[in-house]
Image (spheres, helix red, strand yellow):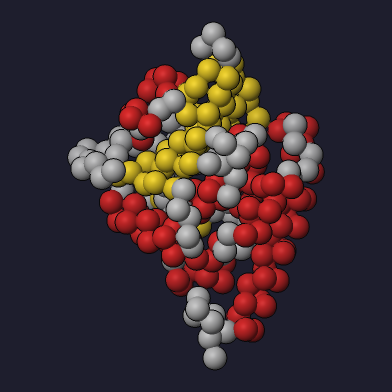
């Protein structure tokens, strides 16, 4: 007998065991990196979101067994689903409130968007690869994430029609912060993103915009993200 997700009870038990192990590994990495990140422990709200979202639904079917391993996994088209610790940390650094409007650049598998959907009022996510955007829509629909909207478009341009945003998160690395994203961040808002060329050195950065539109940067950890690329041709689908 299988359940609605097509998983046998023993499979569910094993997935749950692996999910618990993933959470333990995230806690250990939080403790190890606290002196750089300023976050000694994972917030209760982000922990709850990570526990609610089934990560194995966001990886290719042949990688289900690796879904809860604490490292990034390929999802095709040169993109990855980020390491669980990194998803947790970037989400935590956003300091989300339930009424926030969030812009995500780089939908990818939609795992990050699903996490955000449990913590913010609205999530607007931009993806440049058509196949990934369509797969992401289906996954989020299946999981009932009705407060997430995906757009096929150029992440460098953000989503001006929905701006301003309380928070912005970028899941690929530009070498410099795209000016459009700075413009679309609300005064008093925060942006979390990796900055730097492909490979090292990249830095996970927190940018806070003050009430006079001044931008203040804080570097946390060295990271290695896929580069943020500009699409050659994009047909927008709102």
> What's the residue at 53%, 41% (across, down)?
121
Q: What residue is rendered at 46% in x and 72% in y?
A: 62
In which quadrant will I find the C terminus? top left
Compared with 123, 143 (above or below) is below
The answer to whether residue 230 is left or right of residue 39 is left
- Closer to us: 57 or 60: 57
* Residue 170 appears in view: no
Please count the marks in the image.
0
In the shown orientation, is residue 188 left or right of residue 161? right
Instruction: Determine which quarter of the picture holds residue 96.
Output: top right
Q: Residue 175, relative to residue 79: is it above or below?
A: above
x, y percentage for residue 187?
Answer: 53, 17
Percent x, y of residue 195: 50, 29
At horizontal 60% and vertical 40% (from top left) the residue drawn is 98
In the picture, the quarter occupied by the N terminus is bottom right
Q: Quadrant of residue 211?
A: top right
Identify which residue is drawn at 63% across, 22% down. 218
Q: Position of residue 232 (x, y in %)?
A: 22, 38
Res. 13 visible in picture? yes
Across and down, in percent, residue 204 comes to 58, 32
Q: Is residue 134 left or right of residue 148?
A: left
Q: Which residue is the extreme one toward the top?
A: 212
Give the quarter of the image for residue 53: bottom right
Q: Nearer the viewer, residue 35 or 213?
A: 213
């Amino acid at each position: 007998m299988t359940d609605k997700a097509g998983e046998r009870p023993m499979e569910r038990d094993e997935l749950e065991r692996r999910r618990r192990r993933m959470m333990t590994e995230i806690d250990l990495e939080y403790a190890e990196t606290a002196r750089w990140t300023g976050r000694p422990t994972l917030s209760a709200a982000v922990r709850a979101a990570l526990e609610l979202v089934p990560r194995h639904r966001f990886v290719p079917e042949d990688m289900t067994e690796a879904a809860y391993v604490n490292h990034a996994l390929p999802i095709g088209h040169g993109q990855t689903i980020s390491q669980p610790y990194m998803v947790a940390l970037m989400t935590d650094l956003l300091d989300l409130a339930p009424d926030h409007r969030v812009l995500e650049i780089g939908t990818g598998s939609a795992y990050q968007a699903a996490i955000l959907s449990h913590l913010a009022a609205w999530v607007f996510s931009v993806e440049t690869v058509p196949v990934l955007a369509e797969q992401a829509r289906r996954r989020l629909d299946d999981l009932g994430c009705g407060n997430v909207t995906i757009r096929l478009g150029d992440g460098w341009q953000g989503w001006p029609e929905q701006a301003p945003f309380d928070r912005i998160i970028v899941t690929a690395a530009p070498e410099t912060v795209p000016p459009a994203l700075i413009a679309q961040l609300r005064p008093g808002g925060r942006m979390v993103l990796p900055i730097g060329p492909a490979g090292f050195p990249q830095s996970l950065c927190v940018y806070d915009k003050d009430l006079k539109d001044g931008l203040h940067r804080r570097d946390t950890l060295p990271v290695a993200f896929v580069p943020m690329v500009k699409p050659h041709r994009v047909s927008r689908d709102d």
